[in-house]
Image (cartoon, rainbow, N blue to C red):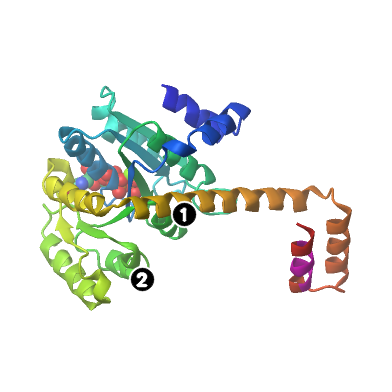
Amino acid sequence: MALARAITAAENETPEGAAILASIQPHLGRALVVGITGPPGAGKSTLTSALITELRRRGHRVAVLAIDPTSPISGGAILGDRIRMSEHSADPGVFVRSVASRGQLGGLSPTAARVIDLMDAAGNDTVIVETVGAGQSEVEVAQIADVKVVICPPGAGDDIQAIKAGILEIADILVVNKADQAQATNTASQLRNMVALRSDDSADVPVLLTTATQGKGVAELVDAIEARRGRDDPDTRATRIRGRSRRQLAEALARDVAAFVRSGSDPAIEELCAELEGGTLGLDEALRRVRGLI
Ligand SMILES: Nc1nc2c(ncn2[C@@H]2O[C@H](COP(=O)(O)OP(=O)(O)OP(=O)(O)O)[C@@H](O)[C@H]2O)c(=O)[nH]1
Ligand SMILES: [Mg+2]
């Protein structure tokens, strides 16, 4: 309940929220953040629920952040996720939260990183972040997550093409879910071929088969995720937290500066805008001068 309240306070940017966020810094970096991404309907939520079951069996405390796809295609996802993860709702070792997918700058919700930090500081050793792989958000998840799991449904040539074009590059683990369907093994070999064509460091990207609805292959997926956790030394951990903090500062700054420029309250900015409008000043030069102001 405390975590839920802290997240709400952080989302609403209340003074209490800011105080909590400031106080949790020393407690960050204990959780392994697992990103689950893939096309709509690939089975991300079902697999997440199965992952929770297996992680709980192994004694982990798990928090899930489902980034709500606000697109019309997968509307109602939050309700669906609630149903799919409801089997864990009575378990005090599991915490599930959904947030809207789009921030003011068009990317991942700016609060997502903060919510992950709060989940981490609250003592969850595994944080799962589910996002639909449909553009920008999965790339941003890659910047947040320590382990990136990309899910591909069987057979869909188009989906493989999309994954090839975008998210294959970020995957640490590839999963063909719905292994109970006929095309699954074929899709897995296609993905293995694609992985083999990648540069050397991709050699250890496993391609796994799961049937999330039956919990099949889930233990092997957790093993692959745990192998990553095992590789984690204090240095990479520290780098990871620094990366997250830097990203948060950059996002907060970008929002602040945008609000400042839009507010129309600064004479120097107003002068620049007038010159831009009048065509006597180019955008590059205006940017250069604004940099001098902040
Ligand atoms: N046959 C089969 N169906 C599955 C499997 N895993 C998930 N499904 C079904 O696929 C549908 C979509 O599953 P979700 O878990 O909601 O997929 P998702 O990727 O979270 O979907 P969005 O969040 O809307 O993008 C549901 O009807 C699931 O029951 C599987 O292993 N085999
Ligand atoms: Mg889902």
For this rendering, which residue is in front, 292 or 206? 292
Mark 1 lies on a secondary structure that is: helix
Left or right of 145: which side holds 294?
Answer: right
Q: Is residue 161 above or below residue 87?
A: below
Disc 2 residue type (three-letter): Ala
Q: Which of the labelled discs sits on residue 243, or is there none?
A: 1
Question: Secondary structure of the magenta portion, mostly?
Answer: helix
Q: Is residue 19 above or below residue 231?
A: above
**Residue at x-position 17% and y-position 50%:** 221
Q: Is residue 148 above or below residue 157?
A: above
Q: Is residue 245 magenta?
A: no
**Residue at x-position 61% and y-position 30%:** 14
Span highlighted in magenta in the image: 285-290
**Residue extending farthest front:** 234
Splitting the image into 4 quarters, where does residue 160 fall? Answer: bottom left
Q: Is residue 227 above or below residue 85?
A: below
Q: Circle 2 is placed at which residue position?
A: 165
Left or right of 156: which side holds 57?
Answer: left
Disc 1 residue type (three-letter): Gly
For this rendering, which residue is in front, 221 or 245? 245
Q: Earlier in the sequence, mark 2 or mark 1?
A: 2
**Residue at x-position 44% and y-position 35%:** 118
Left or right of 33: which side holds 278?
Answer: right
